[in-house]
Amino acid sequence: KAGVTQTPRYLIKTRGQQVTLSCSPISGHRSVSWYQQTPGQGLQFLFEYFSETQRNKGNFPGRFSGRQFSNSRSEMNVSTLELGDSALYLCASSVRRGSIQYFGAGTRLSVL
Amino acid sequence: AQTVTQSQPEMSVQEAETVTLSCTYDTSENNYYLFWYKQPPSRQMILVIRQEAYKQQNATENRFSVNFQKAAKSFSLKISDSQLGDTAMYFCAFISGNTPLVFGKGTRLSVIA
């Protein structure tokens, strides 16, 4: 069974641009969560989607948004990029909410 | 709010030796899961071991085992016969009900030949 797939693996953007990251969960997994990882703040929860609905949201500005499609694939979008948005963005999927989460390899976003 | 604390930012161990990574957590919940994840330089977050709070028996996975002390809210990871491939960041994590997974700040483990 294929694991969690995140695309792209690397991304370079400039300030003010917007970016969309994609996550394909493990087949049969319906819950997708997103995390931001930085050296200073560690792993911070962004949001969780289940059955195409956002179930939880972390403490991030409205520039960060996401969605989930009927096939459980998820995208997150960051608008008006700032230098501080440079980070590793990790996606994790689980069979159901509150169960074991399996992670993708992440998308490394660099904002110049 | 649940919190997870890893008090050892960095540790090192000789190859083939045993090392223990510490983790404490704070919660008012009675039913929850605890995890140790490993993140090698490749960045892929890999599940090492999990523990259900309602189980008294400590979980083991090959060379990895935990010491789960529910009353003390402690969840340490023991790695036996350390191998060079164990070099990574190790994160302790907690989840309860439908709340998000909460991570500690991690322990960087270096296995020395």
Image: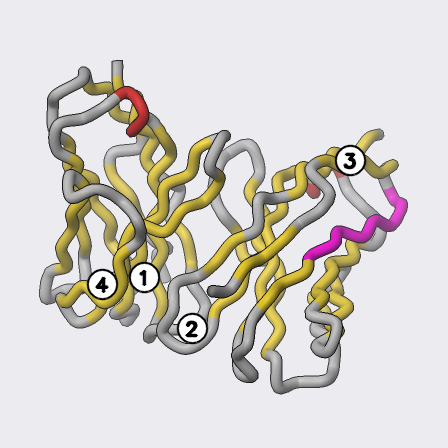
Q: Mark 3 lies on which chain?
A: B
Query: What chain is tagged by disc 4?
Result: A
Determine the residue positioned at 89% across, 45% down.
B17
Dot placed on the residue nearer the N-terminal end, 4 or 2: 4
Q: Name which residue type carries label 2.
A: Ser
Tags 4 and 1 in contact by the CB under 8 Å rule? no
At 55% from the left edge and 43% from the top edge, which residue is drawn?
B39
Which circle, 2 or 1, is nearer the viewer? 2
**Residue that sits furthest to the top in the current view:** A112
Mark with earlier residue (2, 1) = 1
Question: Circle 4 sits on which residue?
Answer: A49
- Label 3 secondary element: strand
Q: Which chain carries label 2?
A: A
Range covered by the magenta-colored residues: B16-23
Secondary structure under tag 1 reads loop
Amino acid at circle 4: Tyr
Q: Do labels 4 and 2 share a chain?
A: yes
* Residue B52 x %, y %: 59, 78
